[in-house]
Amino acid sequence: MARIVVLGGDGFCGWPTALKLSAEGHQVAIIDNLSRRRIDAELGVESLTPIADMPGRIAAWKRVSGRTLSFANIDIAHDYDGLRAYLADFAPQTVVHFAEQRAAPYSMRDAAHKRYTVDNNINGTHNLLAALVELDLDAHLVHLGTMGVYGYDGDGLELPEGYLDVSVAGPNGTRYPRSILYPTQPGSVYHLTKSLDQLLFQFYARNDGLRITDLHQGIVWGTQTEETRLDPALINRFDYDGDYGTVLNRFLMQAVVGHPLTVHGTGGQTRAFINIQDTVRCVSLAVANPPARGERVHILNQVAETHRVSDLAELVAETTGAEVAFVDNPRKEAAENTLRVSNQTFRSLGLEPILLRDALLAETLEIADRYKDRYDVRAIPATALWTRNTRPGTLKSR
Ligand code: NAD
Ligand code: USQ
Protein backbone atom coordinates (compact mmCIF):
# COMPACT_ATOMS: atom_id res chain seq x y z
CA MET A 1 0.00 0.00 0.00
CA ALA A 2 1.23 3.46 -0.86
CA ARG A 3 1.33 6.98 0.56
CA ILE A 4 -0.82 9.02 -1.83
CA VAL A 5 -1.50 12.73 -1.78
CA VAL A 6 -4.65 13.94 -3.57
CA LEU A 7 -4.38 17.58 -4.64
CA GLY A 8 -7.86 19.08 -5.01
CA GLY A 9 -9.30 16.33 -2.80
CA ASP A 10 -12.25 18.47 -1.66
CA GLY A 11 -13.65 18.71 -5.20
CA PHE A 12 -16.23 16.78 -7.22
CA CYS A 13 -13.77 14.20 -8.59
CA GLY A 14 -11.08 14.51 -5.90
CA TRP A 15 -13.22 13.74 -2.86
CA PRO A 16 -14.64 10.38 -4.05
CA THR A 17 -11.19 9.47 -5.41
CA ALA A 18 -9.57 10.13 -2.03
CA LEU A 19 -12.20 7.89 -0.38
CA LYS A 20 -11.70 5.11 -2.94
CA LEU A 21 -7.91 5.12 -2.53
CA SER A 22 -8.30 5.16 1.26
CA ALA A 23 -10.78 2.25 1.07
CA GLU A 24 -8.20 0.32 -0.95
CA GLY A 25 -5.84 0.61 2.02
CA HIS A 26 -3.56 3.43 0.88
CA GLN A 27 -2.44 6.12 3.30
CA VAL A 28 -4.19 9.15 1.80
CA ALA A 29 -3.57 12.85 2.42
CA ILE A 30 -5.64 15.63 0.86
CA ILE A 31 -4.32 19.04 -0.09
CA ASP A 32 -6.90 21.65 -1.09
CA ASN A 33 -7.16 25.42 -0.64
CA LEU A 34 -10.98 25.23 -0.62
CA SER A 35 -11.11 27.74 -3.51
CA ARG A 36 -14.01 25.84 -5.06
CA ARG A 37 -16.18 26.58 -2.02
CA ARG A 38 -15.17 30.26 -2.21
CA ILE A 39 -16.08 30.37 -5.90
CA ASP A 40 -19.58 29.11 -4.99
CA ALA A 41 -19.85 32.10 -2.65
CA GLU A 42 -18.53 34.44 -5.36
CA LEU A 43 -21.14 33.16 -7.83
CA GLY A 44 -23.91 33.07 -5.23
CA VAL A 45 -24.58 29.37 -5.87
CA GLU A 46 -24.26 26.13 -3.91
CA SER A 47 -23.89 22.44 -4.58
CA LEU A 48 -27.38 20.94 -4.84
CA THR A 49 -26.31 18.32 -2.33
CA PRO A 50 -25.42 19.67 1.12
CA ILE A 51 -21.69 18.98 1.44
CA ALA A 52 -20.07 18.72 4.85
CA ASP A 53 -17.01 20.82 5.67
CA MET A 54 -13.63 19.11 5.55
CA PRO A 55 -13.44 18.19 9.27
CA GLY A 56 -16.99 16.78 9.01
CA ARG A 57 -16.09 14.76 5.90
CA ILE A 58 -12.97 13.33 7.49
CA ALA A 59 -14.75 12.46 10.76
CA ALA A 60 -17.54 10.69 8.83
CA TRP A 61 -15.01 8.63 6.88
CA LYS A 62 -13.26 7.63 10.12
CA ARG A 63 -16.65 6.60 11.55
CA VAL A 64 -17.71 4.39 8.65
CA SER A 65 -14.34 2.98 7.58
CA GLY A 66 -12.08 3.29 10.62
CA ARG A 67 -9.54 4.89 8.29
CA THR A 68 -7.75 8.21 8.70
CA LEU A 69 -7.53 10.86 5.98
CA SER A 70 -5.27 13.82 6.61
CA PHE A 71 -5.91 17.29 5.23
CA ALA A 72 -3.78 20.39 4.61
CA ASN A 73 -5.12 23.71 3.36
CA ILE A 74 -2.38 24.76 0.91
CA ASP A 75 -2.70 26.89 -2.22
CA ILE A 76 -0.43 24.91 -4.55
CA ALA A 77 -0.25 27.81 -7.03
CA HIS A 78 0.93 30.44 -4.57
CA ASP A 79 2.46 28.69 -1.58
CA TYR A 80 5.41 26.85 -3.07
CA ASP A 81 7.22 26.57 0.27
CA GLY A 82 4.14 25.13 1.97
CA LEU A 83 3.66 22.57 -0.83
CA ARG A 84 7.33 21.57 -0.85
CA ALA A 85 7.46 21.21 2.95
CA TYR A 86 4.32 19.05 2.93
CA LEU A 87 5.65 16.80 0.18
CA ALA A 88 9.03 16.51 1.92
CA ASP A 89 7.35 15.41 5.14
CA PHE A 90 4.73 13.04 3.67
CA ALA A 91 7.03 11.64 0.97
CA PRO A 92 4.21 10.41 -1.28
CA GLN A 93 4.74 7.53 -3.69
CA THR A 94 1.87 8.87 -5.82
CA VAL A 95 0.49 12.38 -6.30
CA VAL A 96 -2.98 12.65 -7.87
CA HIS A 97 -3.48 16.18 -9.20
CA PHE A 98 -7.05 17.52 -9.52
CA ALA A 99 -6.28 21.00 -8.11
CA GLU A 100 -7.17 23.33 -10.98
CA GLN A 101 -9.96 25.76 -11.87
CA ARG A 102 -11.98 23.48 -14.10
CA ALA A 103 -15.02 25.34 -15.47
CA ALA A 104 -14.75 26.52 -19.07
CA PRO A 105 -17.49 29.19 -18.66
CA TYR A 106 -15.89 30.54 -15.47
CA SER A 107 -12.58 30.83 -17.32
CA MET A 108 -14.27 32.92 -20.05
CA ARG A 109 -16.20 35.38 -17.85
CA ASP A 110 -13.81 38.30 -18.26
CA ALA A 111 -10.13 39.17 -18.18
CA ALA A 112 -9.90 38.72 -14.41
CA HIS A 113 -11.26 35.16 -14.58
CA LYS A 114 -9.08 34.27 -17.57
CA ARG A 115 -6.01 35.51 -15.70
CA TYR A 116 -7.01 33.71 -12.51
CA THR A 117 -7.47 30.42 -14.37
CA VAL A 118 -4.11 30.63 -16.16
CA ASP A 119 -2.29 31.76 -13.03
CA ASN A 120 -3.87 29.12 -10.78
CA ASN A 121 -3.62 26.15 -13.14
CA ILE A 122 -0.23 26.73 -14.70
CA ASN A 123 1.52 27.87 -11.53
CA GLY A 124 -0.02 25.04 -9.52
CA THR A 125 1.07 22.36 -11.97
CA HIS A 126 4.51 23.87 -12.38
CA ASN A 127 5.05 24.31 -8.63
CA LEU A 128 4.27 20.64 -8.17
CA LEU A 129 6.71 19.53 -10.87
CA ALA A 130 9.47 21.81 -9.59
CA ALA A 131 8.94 20.60 -6.02
CA LEU A 132 9.14 16.93 -7.02
CA VAL A 133 12.46 17.64 -8.74
CA GLU A 134 13.85 19.83 -5.98
CA LEU A 135 13.03 17.15 -3.38
CA ASP A 136 14.25 14.36 -5.66
CA LEU A 137 10.96 12.57 -4.98
CA ASP A 138 10.34 9.66 -7.32
CA ALA A 139 6.55 9.91 -6.97
CA HIS A 140 4.22 8.92 -9.80
CA LEU A 141 2.19 11.97 -10.82
CA VAL A 142 -1.34 11.22 -12.04
CA HIS A 143 -2.94 14.33 -13.52
CA LEU A 144 -6.54 14.91 -14.52
CA GLY A 145 -6.50 16.42 -17.98
CA THR A 146 -9.34 16.75 -20.43
CA MET A 147 -10.63 15.42 -23.74
CA GLY A 148 -11.14 19.06 -24.77
CA VAL A 149 -7.43 19.50 -25.55
CA TYR A 150 -7.93 17.54 -28.78
CA GLY A 151 -10.59 19.93 -30.03
CA TYR A 152 -13.72 18.84 -31.85
CA ASP A 153 -12.85 18.71 -35.55
CA GLY A 154 -15.28 15.90 -36.07
CA ASP A 155 -14.11 14.49 -39.38
CA GLY A 156 -14.32 10.88 -38.22
CA LEU A 157 -10.71 10.29 -37.13
CA GLU A 158 -10.55 8.18 -33.97
CA LEU A 159 -8.70 10.34 -31.41
CA PRO A 160 -5.60 8.46 -30.31
CA GLU A 161 -4.30 8.45 -26.72
CA GLY A 162 -2.26 11.63 -26.64
CA TYR A 163 0.23 11.07 -29.43
CA LEU A 164 0.12 11.21 -33.18
CA ASP A 165 2.55 9.18 -35.29
CA VAL A 166 3.43 11.28 -38.31
CA SER A 167 5.92 11.08 -41.11
CA VAL A 168 7.36 14.38 -42.33
CA ALA A 169 8.51 14.71 -45.95
CA GLY A 170 12.17 15.84 -46.36
CA PRO A 171 14.22 16.49 -49.50
CA ASN A 172 14.78 13.69 -52.02
CA GLY A 173 11.84 11.67 -50.80
CA THR A 174 13.28 11.13 -47.28
CA ARG A 175 10.59 10.59 -44.66
CA TYR A 176 11.16 11.52 -41.02
CA PRO A 177 8.95 9.60 -38.59
CA ARG A 178 7.91 11.45 -35.45
CA SER A 179 5.60 10.73 -32.53
CA ILE A 180 4.27 14.09 -31.41
CA LEU A 181 1.75 15.31 -28.86
CA TYR A 182 -1.60 15.47 -30.63
CA PRO A 183 -1.91 19.11 -31.74
CA THR A 184 -4.18 20.88 -29.30
CA GLN A 185 -7.23 22.91 -30.17
CA PRO A 186 -8.61 24.15 -26.86
CA GLY A 187 -12.08 25.70 -26.84
CA SER A 188 -11.74 27.88 -23.73
CA VAL A 189 -9.03 29.44 -21.56
CA TYR A 190 -9.58 26.59 -19.11
CA HIS A 191 -8.97 24.00 -21.85
CA LEU A 192 -5.96 26.06 -22.94
CA THR A 193 -4.39 25.60 -19.48
CA LYS A 194 -4.76 21.82 -19.85
CA SER A 195 -3.00 22.05 -23.22
CA LEU A 196 -0.14 24.00 -21.61
CA ASP A 197 0.03 21.46 -18.75
CA GLN A 198 0.87 18.83 -21.37
CA LEU A 199 4.03 20.70 -22.38
CA LEU A 200 5.10 21.05 -18.75
CA PHE A 201 4.70 17.30 -18.32
CA GLN A 202 6.58 16.50 -21.52
CA PHE A 203 9.50 18.68 -20.41
CA TYR A 204 9.77 17.31 -16.86
CA ALA A 205 9.44 13.70 -17.99
CA ARG A 206 12.27 14.21 -20.49
CA ASN A 207 14.51 16.46 -18.46
CA ASP A 208 14.12 14.98 -14.99
CA GLY A 209 12.74 11.51 -15.61
CA LEU A 210 9.52 12.25 -13.70
CA ARG A 211 6.95 9.46 -14.02
CA ILE A 212 3.72 11.06 -15.21
CA THR A 213 0.29 9.82 -16.30
CA ASP A 214 -2.06 12.39 -17.87
CA LEU A 215 -5.70 11.30 -17.97
CA HIS A 216 -7.71 12.95 -20.73
CA GLN A 217 -11.09 12.75 -19.12
CA GLY A 218 -14.48 13.39 -20.71
CA ILE A 219 -17.43 15.15 -19.06
CA VAL A 220 -18.27 13.58 -15.72
CA TRP A 221 -21.86 12.86 -14.76
CA GLY A 222 -23.51 11.38 -11.66
CA THR A 223 -22.72 12.24 -8.07
CA GLN A 224 -22.40 9.29 -5.73
CA THR A 225 -19.85 6.48 -5.58
CA GLU A 226 -19.67 3.31 -3.47
CA GLU A 227 -17.88 5.23 -0.72
CA THR A 228 -19.78 8.55 -0.76
CA ARG A 229 -23.05 6.62 -0.30
CA LEU A 230 -21.92 5.26 3.06
CA ASP A 231 -22.88 8.32 5.13
CA PRO A 232 -24.79 11.58 4.47
CA ALA A 233 -21.72 13.58 5.50
CA LEU A 234 -19.71 11.88 2.73
CA ILE A 235 -22.07 12.99 -0.05
CA ASN A 236 -20.37 14.35 -3.15
CA ARG A 237 -21.02 17.78 -4.65
CA PHE A 238 -23.62 18.24 -7.41
CA ASP A 239 -23.12 21.39 -9.49
CA TYR A 240 -25.95 22.55 -11.73
CA ASP A 241 -25.20 26.25 -12.17
CA GLY A 242 -24.34 27.86 -15.50
CA ASP A 243 -20.58 27.81 -14.87
CA TYR A 244 -19.76 24.56 -13.04
CA GLY A 245 -22.78 22.39 -13.82
CA THR A 246 -21.85 19.91 -16.53
CA VAL A 247 -24.41 19.27 -19.21
CA LEU A 248 -25.99 15.95 -18.20
CA ASN A 249 -26.19 16.80 -14.49
CA ARG A 250 -27.76 20.14 -15.45
CA PHE A 251 -30.36 18.39 -17.61
CA LEU A 252 -31.20 15.89 -14.86
CA MET A 253 -31.62 18.70 -12.31
CA GLN A 254 -33.67 20.79 -14.70
CA ALA A 255 -35.95 17.81 -15.43
CA VAL A 256 -36.66 17.29 -11.73
CA VAL A 257 -37.69 20.91 -11.12
CA GLY A 258 -39.67 21.26 -14.36
CA HIS A 259 -37.25 23.66 -16.05
CA PRO A 260 -36.89 23.19 -19.83
CA LEU A 261 -33.61 21.49 -20.73
CA THR A 262 -31.18 24.20 -21.87
CA VAL A 263 -29.69 22.83 -25.10
CA HIS A 264 -27.09 25.28 -26.49
CA GLY A 265 -27.62 26.01 -30.17
CA THR A 266 -28.74 22.99 -32.17
CA GLY A 267 -27.36 20.50 -29.64
CA GLY A 268 -25.28 18.97 -32.42
CA GLN A 269 -22.14 19.11 -30.23
CA THR A 270 -20.83 15.60 -29.56
CA ARG A 271 -18.85 15.08 -26.36
CA ALA A 272 -17.31 12.21 -24.39
CA PHE A 273 -18.82 11.16 -21.05
CA ILE A 274 -17.88 9.14 -18.00
CA ASN A 275 -19.70 8.38 -14.76
CA ILE A 276 -18.10 9.58 -11.50
CA GLN A 277 -17.85 5.95 -10.28
CA ASP A 278 -15.68 5.17 -13.31
CA THR A 279 -13.60 8.31 -12.73
CA VAL A 280 -12.48 6.89 -9.39
CA ARG A 281 -11.98 3.39 -10.86
CA CYS A 282 -9.83 4.80 -13.66
CA VAL A 283 -7.68 6.85 -11.29
CA SER A 284 -7.18 3.77 -9.14
CA LEU A 285 -6.12 1.77 -12.24
CA ALA A 286 -3.75 4.56 -13.31
CA VAL A 287 -2.20 4.69 -9.84
CA ALA A 288 -1.56 0.94 -10.00
CA ASN A 289 0.08 1.15 -13.46
CA PRO A 290 2.79 3.85 -13.43
CA PRO A 291 5.17 4.47 -16.32
CA ALA A 292 8.78 3.45 -15.84
CA ARG A 293 11.33 6.17 -15.06
CA GLY A 294 12.55 7.65 -18.33
CA GLU A 295 9.42 6.64 -20.23
CA ARG A 296 7.45 9.37 -22.00
CA VAL A 297 4.27 10.67 -20.36
CA HIS A 298 1.49 8.06 -20.39
CA ILE A 299 -1.64 9.65 -21.86
CA LEU A 300 -4.89 7.74 -21.44
CA ASN A 301 -8.32 8.74 -22.66
CA GLN A 302 -10.64 8.42 -19.67
CA VAL A 303 -14.02 8.14 -21.37
CA ALA A 304 -16.87 5.65 -21.51
CA GLU A 305 -18.98 6.77 -24.47
CA THR A 306 -19.82 9.73 -26.69
CA HIS A 307 -23.18 11.47 -27.15
CA ARG A 308 -24.68 14.43 -28.93
CA VAL A 309 -26.05 17.04 -26.54
CA SER A 310 -29.46 16.96 -28.25
CA ASP A 311 -29.60 13.15 -27.90
CA LEU A 312 -28.88 13.49 -24.18
CA ALA A 313 -31.67 16.02 -23.87
CA GLU A 314 -34.01 13.65 -25.69
CA LEU A 315 -33.02 10.75 -23.45
CA VAL A 316 -33.67 12.81 -20.31
CA ALA A 317 -36.93 14.13 -21.80
CA GLU A 318 -38.08 10.56 -22.61
CA THR A 319 -37.21 9.34 -19.13
CA THR A 320 -38.78 12.26 -17.25
CA GLY A 321 -41.26 14.01 -19.53
CA ALA A 322 -39.18 17.23 -19.44
CA GLU A 323 -39.44 19.84 -22.19
CA VAL A 324 -36.42 20.60 -24.37
CA ALA A 325 -35.52 24.25 -25.08
CA PHE A 326 -32.98 25.35 -27.66
CA VAL A 327 -31.20 28.46 -26.34
CA ASP A 328 -28.61 30.75 -27.96
CA ASN A 329 -25.20 29.20 -27.51
CA PRO A 330 -23.08 31.43 -25.23
CA ARG A 331 -19.94 29.58 -26.36
CA LYS A 332 -17.86 29.68 -29.51
CA GLU A 333 -17.85 26.03 -30.58
CA ALA A 334 -18.71 23.99 -33.65
CA ALA A 335 -22.48 23.69 -33.96
CA GLU A 336 -22.13 20.05 -35.04
CA ASN A 337 -19.30 17.56 -34.74
CA THR A 338 -18.72 13.85 -34.69
CA LEU A 339 -16.37 12.32 -32.12
CA ARG A 340 -14.61 8.98 -32.00
CA VAL A 341 -12.19 8.28 -29.15
CA SER A 342 -9.85 5.43 -28.36
CA ASN A 343 -10.03 4.30 -24.73
CA GLN A 344 -8.09 1.11 -25.34
CA THR A 345 -5.66 1.44 -22.42
CA PHE A 346 -8.38 1.49 -19.77
CA ARG A 347 -10.23 -1.26 -21.64
CA SER A 348 -7.08 -3.37 -21.61
CA LEU A 349 -6.71 -2.70 -17.87
CA GLY A 350 -10.17 -4.21 -17.37
CA LEU A 351 -12.48 -1.17 -17.28
CA GLU A 352 -16.06 -2.03 -18.19
CA PRO A 353 -17.61 1.39 -18.09
CA ILE A 354 -21.01 2.30 -16.78
CA LEU A 355 -23.19 3.46 -19.65
CA LEU A 356 -25.81 6.13 -19.61
CA ARG A 357 -28.90 3.96 -19.75
CA ASP A 358 -27.83 2.05 -16.67
CA ALA A 359 -29.33 2.46 -13.23
CA LEU A 360 -27.14 5.39 -12.25
CA LEU A 361 -29.23 7.74 -14.36
CA ALA A 362 -32.13 6.89 -12.05
CA GLU A 363 -29.91 7.33 -9.00
CA THR A 364 -28.82 10.79 -10.13
CA LEU A 365 -32.44 11.76 -10.73
CA GLU A 366 -33.29 10.47 -7.28
CA ILE A 367 -30.52 12.61 -5.70
CA ALA A 368 -31.71 15.66 -7.66
CA ASP A 369 -35.26 14.98 -6.48
CA ARG A 370 -34.22 14.50 -2.84
CA TYR A 371 -32.49 17.89 -2.70
CA LYS A 372 -34.71 19.86 -5.07
CA ASP A 373 -35.73 22.25 -2.27
CA ARG A 374 -32.16 23.58 -2.34
CA TYR A 375 -32.41 24.40 -6.06
CA ASP A 376 -32.20 28.07 -7.06
CA VAL A 377 -33.55 28.94 -10.50
CA ARG A 378 -31.21 31.98 -10.65
CA ALA A 379 -28.26 29.58 -10.95
CA ILE A 380 -29.53 28.06 -14.21
CA PRO A 381 -28.61 30.58 -16.95
CA ALA A 382 -25.18 30.20 -18.51
CA THR A 383 -24.08 33.83 -18.55
CA ALA A 384 -20.39 33.66 -19.51
CA LEU A 385 -20.00 34.67 -23.15
CA TRP A 386 -17.09 33.49 -25.25
CA THR A 387 -16.75 36.47 -27.57
CA ARG A 388 -18.56 39.56 -26.23
CA ASN A 389 -17.90 40.28 -22.63
CA THR A 390 -18.14 43.91 -21.66
CA ARG A 391 -18.52 43.44 -17.92
CA PRO A 392 -15.67 44.88 -15.86
CA GLY A 393 -13.55 42.42 -13.85
CA THR A 394 -15.47 41.63 -10.68
CA LEU A 395 -13.26 38.96 -9.27
CA LYS A 396 -13.47 38.76 -5.51
CA SER A 397 -10.88 37.20 -3.27
CA ARG A 398 -11.06 33.42 -3.26
P1 NAD B 1 -13.60 20.85 -8.67
O1 NAD B 1 -13.52 22.30 -8.94
O2 NAD B 1 -14.82 20.29 -8.03
O3 NAD B 1 -12.34 20.41 -7.76
C1 NAD B 1 -11.07 20.98 -7.86
C2 NAD B 1 -10.52 21.13 -6.45
O4 NAD B 1 -9.21 21.71 -6.53
C3 NAD B 1 -11.38 22.07 -5.59
O5 NAD B 1 -11.71 21.46 -4.37
C4 NAD B 1 -10.49 23.30 -5.41
O6 NAD B 1 -10.72 23.94 -4.15
C5 NAD B 1 -9.09 22.72 -5.54
N1 NAD B 1 -8.09 23.69 -6.02
C6 NAD B 1 -8.16 24.49 -7.13
N2 NAD B 1 -7.07 25.27 -7.21
C7 NAD B 1 -6.28 24.95 -6.15
C8 NAD B 1 -5.03 25.43 -5.68
N3 NAD B 1 -4.37 26.40 -6.30
N4 NAD B 1 -4.50 24.86 -4.56
C9 NAD B 1 -5.16 23.88 -3.91
N5 NAD B 1 -6.36 23.40 -4.28
C10 NAD B 1 -6.92 23.94 -5.39
O7 NAD B 1 -13.31 20.11 -10.05
P2 NAD B 1 -13.53 18.57 -10.45
O8 NAD B 1 -14.77 18.48 -11.23
O9 NAD B 1 -13.34 17.70 -9.27
O10 NAD B 1 -12.32 18.36 -11.44
C11 NAD B 1 -11.07 17.91 -10.96
C12 NAD B 1 -10.08 17.81 -12.11
O11 NAD B 1 -10.59 16.92 -13.09
C13 NAD B 1 -9.87 19.16 -12.80
O12 NAD B 1 -8.50 19.36 -13.02
C14 NAD B 1 -10.63 19.03 -14.09
O13 NAD B 1 -9.98 19.74 -15.10
C15 NAD B 1 -10.61 17.54 -14.36
N6 NAD B 1 -11.81 17.13 -15.11
C16 NAD B 1 -13.08 17.30 -14.59
C17 NAD B 1 -14.19 16.94 -15.36
C18 NAD B 1 -15.61 17.12 -14.87
O14 NAD B 1 -16.53 16.89 -15.66
N7 NAD B 1 -15.84 17.51 -13.61
C19 NAD B 1 -14.00 16.37 -16.62
C20 NAD B 1 -12.70 16.21 -17.13
C21 NAD B 1 -11.61 16.59 -16.35
N1 USQ C 1 -24.21 22.55 -22.93
C1 USQ C 1 -25.54 22.71 -23.27
N2 USQ C 1 -26.40 23.11 -22.30
C2 USQ C 1 -26.01 23.36 -21.02
C3 USQ C 1 -24.65 23.17 -20.68
C4 USQ C 1 -23.78 22.77 -21.67
O1 USQ C 1 -25.93 22.48 -24.40
O2 USQ C 1 -26.86 23.71 -20.20
C5 USQ C 1 -23.25 22.12 -23.97
C6 USQ C 1 -22.03 23.02 -24.11
O3 USQ C 1 -22.30 24.11 -24.98
C7 USQ C 1 -20.99 22.03 -24.63
C8 USQ C 1 -21.38 20.72 -23.98
O4 USQ C 1 -22.73 20.86 -23.56
O5 USQ C 1 -21.12 21.89 -26.01
C9 USQ C 1 -20.52 20.34 -22.79
O6 USQ C 1 -20.54 21.37 -21.82
P1 USQ C 1 -20.17 21.06 -20.28
O7 USQ C 1 -20.32 22.33 -19.51
O8 USQ C 1 -20.90 19.86 -19.82
O9 USQ C 1 -18.63 20.59 -20.40
P2 USQ C 1 -17.30 21.40 -20.65
O10 USQ C 1 -17.48 22.86 -20.63
O11 USQ C 1 -16.65 20.81 -21.85
O12 USQ C 1 -16.42 21.06 -19.37
C10 USQ C 1 -16.58 19.87 -18.57
C11 USQ C 1 -15.83 20.09 -17.26
C12 USQ C 1 -14.35 20.28 -17.57
C13 USQ C 1 -13.84 19.09 -18.38
C14 USQ C 1 -14.66 18.88 -19.64
C15 USQ C 1 -14.32 17.58 -20.33
O13 USQ C 1 -16.34 21.24 -16.58
O14 USQ C 1 -13.62 20.36 -16.34
O15 USQ C 1 -12.50 19.27 -18.72
O16 USQ C 1 -16.06 18.77 -19.27
S1 USQ C 1 -14.36 17.72 -22.09
O17 USQ C 1 -15.60 18.39 -22.48
O18 USQ C 1 -14.30 16.39 -22.62
O19 USQ C 1 -13.22 18.52 -22.45
Image (cartoon, helix red, strand yellow):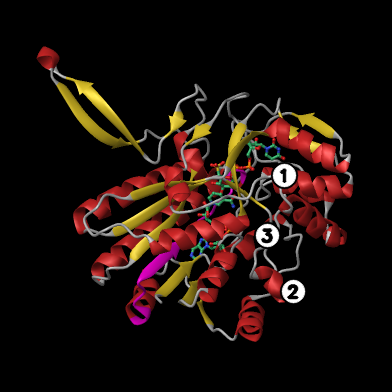
Q: Does the Cβ of the disc 1 residue fall within 8 Å of ligand 2?
A: no
| Residue type beneath disc 2 | Pro
| Left or right of residue 19, residue 316 in this image | right
Compute the Cα span from label 1 to label 3.
31 Å
Image spot of residue 344 (x, y percent): 44, 43
Disc 1, disc 3: CB below 8 Å? no
Compute the Cα span from label 3 to label 2.
21 Å
Image spot of residue 87 (x, y percent): 36, 75
Residue shown at 70%/41% (left/top)? 383
| Residue type beneath disc 1 | Arg
Q: Which residue is mark 1?
A: 357
Which mark is first along the chain, 3 or 1?
A: 3
Q: Which residue is mark 2?
A: 232
Q: Nearer the viewer, residue 224 or 148?
A: 224
Q: Mark 1, residues whose alpha carbon is within 10 Å: few (<14), some, or many (≥20)?
A: few
Disc 2, disc 1: CB below 8 Å? no
Q: Which mark, residue 40?
A: 3
| Left or right of residue 139, residue 389 in this image | right
Q: For numbered disc 3, what is the local secondary structure?
A: helix
**Residue 127 appears in which quarter of the rendering?**
bottom left
Would you place residue 123 above or below residue 227 in this image? above
